[in-house]
Image (cartoon, rainbow, N blue to C red):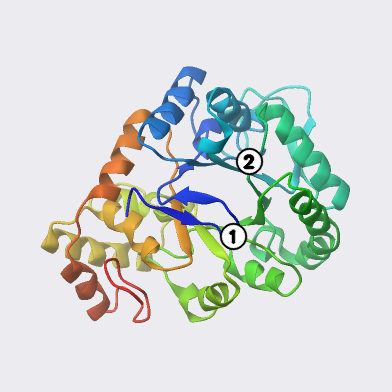
Amino acid sequence: MFGEKRRIGQTALEVTALGFGAATLGNLYHPMPDEAAKAAIEKAFAAELNHIDTAPYYGFGLSERRVGDALREVPANEYVLSTKVGRLLVPCGKAEDKYGFCSPMPFEPVYDYSYDGVMRSYEHSIQRLGLPKIDILYMHDIGRVTHGSDHERLFRIAMEGGYKAMAELRSQGLVSAIGLGVNEYEVCEQAMDHADFDCFLLAGRYTLLEQQVLERFLPRCVESNTSIVLGGPYNSGILATGVKREGAIFHYNYEPAPREIIERVARIEEMCHEFAVPLPAAALQFPLAHPVVVSVIPGLSSPRRVESAVSQMQTAIPAAFWAALQDVGLIHPEAPLPGRKG
């Protein structure tokens, strides 16, 4: 599983099953030096990961700059790079910690899903990255959960304007694939009624903890040959840490986890203990059993975390473990299981 590459939709792009989520390189939650960011990416490529995802929003340009600095001497055919559109970075006079990023970049992110906004965002990303290409371009954080009552207005702008710009960039060969980068699968379904996307970067919605997307969305992706890159495989950390630490605050969907989620993770942990399976390894490997999931991209902020993720992907997990989880209702009955077809 770890060493294989999988094709993005009907494109020529092939990505490794384990990718590199670079939100952390934007100083997410705490600062990190440039040298540490570069070392993490170099470690990933030494481990033969070829897929890295960033965005203008991550550190307000900082993540893109660091990714570009690390990849500049890497041959372009050796990596698959994705970034995002939907926000423009507007100078704000001074840098300040906000939205979880402790970034020295003096910009304020402003939503803009228009044709012009998407074209400007693409051009700005190319300049920040300083690289010859962007392979995958995602429209970032469109959806009702993010925008509330303003969703329908922004969605219309995105489909009539922003998508048109993305499709033009694809038709001109300036990007190879386009999609949405979101936390809610419902907006992906809605967008599929209006546009032709190659892939979706979906954070946290098909994990060891939740599989509602099996009922309608993932079957539709199978029919349309639309690939899923799975971000947030640990559901904001709770599937990485487990829930056994006394007095700790466990996070799910970027917030303190509710009681029912903690209890469900505790049951999964019990099964992990019974079969001697590390919880993070199960969390990384489970989504990849589905035929439309081409890659999982946890946040990898250091060489040590890269090593840990690689080790988790290489951990042998017995088929009986997955079957046991499914038998007791902790995995959806229609979920494909690692090591099996279906």
Name the residue located 69 percent from the left edge and 28 percent from the top edge. 128
Indicate left or right for 314 with 107 as reference: left
Horizontal and vertical percent position of residue 191: 70, 68
Q: Nearer the viewer, residue 90 or 77?
A: 77
Q: Circle 1 — which element? A: strand
- Amino acid type of the residue tagged 1 in the rendering: Phe
Q: Which quarter of the image is occupied by the N terminus?
A: bottom left
Q: CA distance from mark 1 to mark 2?
A: 14 Å
Name the residue located 37 percent from the left edge and 81 percent from the top edge. 334
Horizontal and vertical percent position of residue 18: 40, 48
> Is the residue 222 above or below the residue 57 in the image?
below
Residue at mark 1 = 200
Q: Circle 2 — which element? A: loop
Residue 233: quadrant of the picture: bottom left
Residue at mark 2 = 55
> Is the residue 48 above or below the residue 16 in the image?
above
> Is the residue 308 above or below the residue 106 in the image?
below
